[in-house]
Amino acid sequence: MFHPSLFKDINVVVTGAGRGIGLEVARQFLDCGATVYLHGGRIAREPLPDFLDSALVDGRAYLSYADFSMAGGVDLLAESIGKRFRSIDVLVNNAGTMVGRFLAGDLTDAQYESVVQLNQTAVVQTTRALLPLLRRGTNPAIINTVSISALTGGSAGSSIYSATKAFVSTYSKALARELAPESIRVNCVSPGTITTDFHDRYSSAEKLEATRKTIPLQRLGTAEDCAPAYLFLASHTLSGYITGQVLEVNGGQLIC
């Protein structure tokens, strides 16, 4: 585990932090001394985990909700963050989900637009809205969540979701080049098959077991497996010469 003062005096924003990978990323940043603003998604979820309750009381964490699928959702979050932080040192763009499995022949325009808005457009909007605060940060870093499906194309019904993750991967590389003169690093974490409620909603137990058998480490990943990759890429001390990269966290799936 990282040193408990690694991110002391560092302000971190994590979107999509209401559960799963985002919540665990926020927890580990808090454990390492950061002050963390959590975007909890579009609706409040109760009860809050004990670590977050304590951090909110202590003023080390802030929490608000905004629906990125709706017009003005990102602006609402950015306005709230701006009231708390004069500067941001780390932005983790983690919000997003598959929305549903939509086969190519049945996909409606509304379904297409909802997947693109949540997983692609909202990342661009959030980055744009928070760049002024990042420019005031100390050794600022952006970490975007993509997916193994950005490379593999995913499975049936996930083509648009997979394509949006590929967009974010390419966008991140272009952004890394653009922002390098300002010493703002941009990288991605690309989780493989991770046991969060994402797969509870979109994958069957049989599909997950079949996937598990193909993974060299012979197990599915956890949020705890993924979170340290975000902290590594956020730390100037550990990764200050790394930008424009995608860190794959998948137990070896891609070497099969």
Image (cartoon, rainbow, N blue to C red):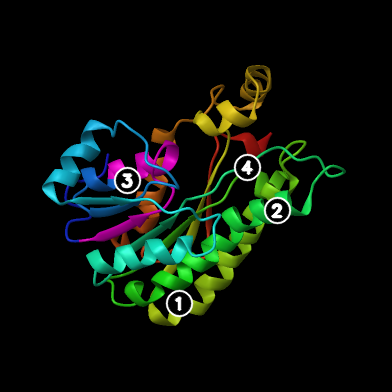
Q: Nearer the viewer, residue 138 or 240?
A: 138
Of labels 4 and 1, the one closer to you: 4
Q: Position of residue 65 (x, y in %)?
A: 38, 51
Q: Name the quadrant containing residue 52.
A: top left
SS type, badge 3: helix
Task: Tell me: 73 left or right of 59.
Answer: right
On residue 180, the disc is 1
Q: Amino acid at mark 2?
A: Ala
* Mark 3 and mark 1 residues within 8 Å of each other at the beta carbon: no
SS type, badge 4: loop
Residue at (36%, 77%) from the top-left corner? 132
SS type, badge 1: helix
What residue is disc 3 on? Answer: 26
Of labels 2 and 1, the one closer to you: 2
Q: Position of residue 238 (x, y in %)?
A: 32, 56
What residue is disc 4 on? Answer: 99
Q: Is residue 129 above or below residue 247?
A: below
Which stretch did the figure color magenta? 10-28
Residue 66 in view:
yes
